[in-house]
Each structure stands twice: as C-alpha cells, then as structure tokens.
Image (spheres, rainbow, N blue to C red):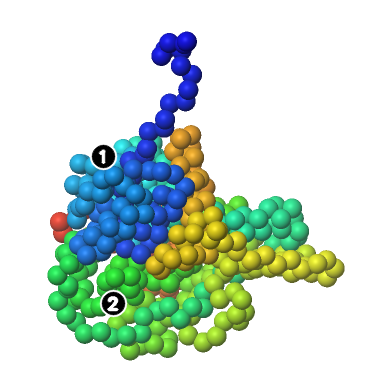
Amino acid sequence: MPSALQDSSPVPKKKRRVAAIGVGWYGKCDLLRLMQVEPVDVVALCDVDSQMLANAAELITKRGKLEKPPALYSDYRKLLAEAKPDIVLIATPDHWHALTMIAAVEAGADVYVQKPTSVDVAESQAMLAAARKHGRVVQVGTQRRSTPHIAEAKQKFIDTGMLGKIGLVEVYCYYHMRAKENPPITEPPENLDYEMWAGPAPKRPYSALIHPRRWRAFTEYGNGIMGDMCIHMLDTARFMLGLGWPQAVSSVGGIYVDRQSQANIPDTQTATFDFGDLDVVWQHRSYGSTPDPKYPWGVTIYGDKGTLKVSVMSYDFIPQGRGEAVHKDVTYELEEYPEDKTEKDLEKHVAPAIRAHMRNFLKAIDERSKPIADIEEGHISTVSCLLANLSLELGRTLRWDAVNGLVIDDAEANSRLARPYRAPWVHPGVKLS
C-alpha cells in the first residue's frame, strides 16, 4: 500500500473567496452567474441599502447552499480589510466604480467591474494604472465579447472577409428608456444611506428616480444612454473589427423632445468615432420608432460584399448580390440552468453571455493573463463614450492623443477630463498636463 507521501490523488481545489460590492439588480445577476460556473465561497456582500443587502444575502445563501451566510457591510473599505476576498464583483452605480475597483486591487483582489469603467476620463486612467501596478486581473462587464452568437458572427463573416471592405459601422439604441417622470423631492428612505450612496458625486435632492436602478437619468451619477448603451455596442464593434482608439470623436444632440422630466441626460444624440478609414456612428433617441423592429439596439456593419446586423438577440448576414442570407437567434441555456427560468429580473437571453464572461475571467485569473474584456479594452470603450459626451458639451470635435491620454490642442477639454469630487472623497485621477 502506498504511503501518504506517494498518494497521487488530486488535491481538492480551494474555493475562491468572493465578495460583491453593490448587490442590486445587476450585482445579483453577476454573482449568481459566477456561482453557476464555479462553486465559490461567497464571503461578503456590501451595499448602502440595508434592505437590498438583506434580500441579496438571503437569496445568495439559499441559491449557493452556503454553510455560513456572507458577512454584510455598508462600507466597502471595511469589507476589503476584514473579508480579504480573492475576487471582488463591483456593480455599484457608475460614480462609485473607480474608487471601489482601485481599493480592491490595492487589497490584492482580482476584479469584475461593471461597465462603464468610470464617469470621467481620469478615473478610468487611474483604474487601468492601478490594475497594472498591482498585477491584478480586471474584467469589465462588456459581455457582448462573450455572447456566443456574436462571437460566431465575428468568426463567420468578419474574420473570413465575407463582408469585403468595411467602410461604415452604425451602432444605435432606440429604446424608450429615458425617465419621463417628476416624482416629488422627499427624504431618502430609512434603509438607504444616501450620504454614502452619493459619495464623491454631487448630492442631488432625493427623489424616487435616484434609487434604485433609475439613477442613470442624471449626469451626476452616470453618462446617460451614451454611457449605458453605446459603450456595449461600440465595444462590440471594436471587438469584432479589432479596433483600438478612435483618433477623433464628435457628437451633437440634447434634450429635444422631453423637457419636462427631472432627467438631465440627452434624449437625442449622434456621435461619430473616427478610426481613420472607418467611421463608427452612434445614434440614440428615446422616442419614435426603430428603423428595424428586429434590431432596436445593435450594430450594423457595412461592407462592399455584404451587411451584418448584430444584437443581443440575433444576427443577420445579408449578402450583396449573390449568396444566401444567414440568420441566427440567441441560444438560451434554460435546461442546463433551470434556475434561470424563475430568477427575478434576469435577462434570460444575456445569462449565457455572463456565464461565458465569468468563465473567461476565472481562466485569466488562473493563468494570470488578460481576460477578453480586460480593463484596458473597457477603458478604451468607456473613454471614447465620455469624449462623445464632452464633444456634445463643448460643441466641437475632439482629437485624441491615446499615448498621452489627452485631447490634442484643447486646454478646456483637458480641464474637464476629471470631474470635481465631493469632500471628503479624493479623486484618484492621474496628473493631467
């Protein structure tokens, strides 16, 4: 009989210690998908809404059959110091992404952070610098890169050259998703620490549009439909075509139709991202009909041999002249993961993409490599959208110096790459010159 020293049986893999900061709608979606692809040890949850935190803890404990419920925190700094997680998932409102991600990598964790990376350019630059300085794996939640049918469309029609010479890409969103209400100004609910929720951002008078989930109505906490929806489809176009930085960005738009709502984000916006011999043109409006009901939010790539339409729901290849059109719908995984069928508020068509994104993230951690939506890729797509909003604000085209991270010959634009922080929070941005 072999001795213990000769035993060649595999050593059980130690469970990764996982914490989540921000456990509202998408925070739970991300964490539950991670739990589906690997039996992780969820050690801590953090949220400034005590009711949301308690509900998430109950759900995660039940779904994960956890022996011990996760520790609960209202301050991410205390969580990082005490729970010492290996992995941190961040799904806070956008204005909190930078500080929480930087603190997590400084604490030695690998991070999955929701898109966009930040609400200003200098924050995103600091996030990339921190990830590289501390050698951490950071995956951004631009999961279109891991959407199976989108990856298939790239391989079949882009990589093989079936579209021919590509000269134009349109990215767009025609969802009626901009808030239209004017709820009364009230005191925040008792379960919400509104001071901490606002954090480094301006503290607007509280209304029901601010929490939960509707804070994107305000530029103080996000970057409107551009920062919410364009980043996904711009990033998809960049992924499919292998694009880096745009050399110039221009944008026009404003609040043209709905001027009554509290929302201060544009209801109409067009932006052009100039990649040299290729333009990517974004358009959104939160009213009217969509040009193609099958593609209300998506990417259309035009080549001289064919056109490719891609969305979260499907793709369509339309050949120019001879050839057969090809259609493919999203693949659901409801039988493999039956809990998807009943999970509250889950976008069932997106769940396979999140799972694939999580698997890619875990593989990168094991290999200490860059994941498919590495922080640098998320940084490029985020900053491109931020520059579009800045172009709209300033009323001129912005030429971008990607090496130095500055707008070329535009001191006013560069002065706005970092937004003022509300005391006592300190902006992490790199020095701008």
**Count of picture labels:** 2
In the picture of the structure, the residue carrying the numbered disc 1 is 84
Residue placed most toward the observer, 221 or 417: 221
Q: Residue at x 22, y 65 (%)?
A: 51
Instruction: Indicate the secondary structure of the residue bearing disc 1.
Output: loop
**Residue occupying image coordinates x 30% and y 41%:** 85
Q: x, y (%) of residue 422?
A: 19, 62
| Residue 100, above or below 223 | above
Q: Is residue 118 visible?
A: no
Query: In this picture, is 405 found above or below 364?
Result: below
- Tag 2: amino acid: Leu
Q: Which residue lies at the image location 29% right of the left edge and 44% below the top edge?
A: 67
Q: Is residue 165 left or right of residue 248?
A: right
Sequence-earlier tag: 2 or 1: 1
Looking at the rendered structure, the kind of residue marked 1 is: Lys
The image's mark for residue 289 is none
* Quadrant of residue 330 within the rendered picture: bottom right
| Position of residue 308 measured from the top left corner of the image (x, y, whole percent) | 68, 66
* Depth check, front residue: 96 or 312: 312
Q: Which residue is mark 2?
A: 209
**Disc 2 versus disc 1: distance between alpha carbons?**
34 Å
Please tell me which residue is depicted at 55% across the width and 85% down the height of the picture: 289
Secondary element type, mark 2: loop
Quadrant in which residue 38 is drawn: top left
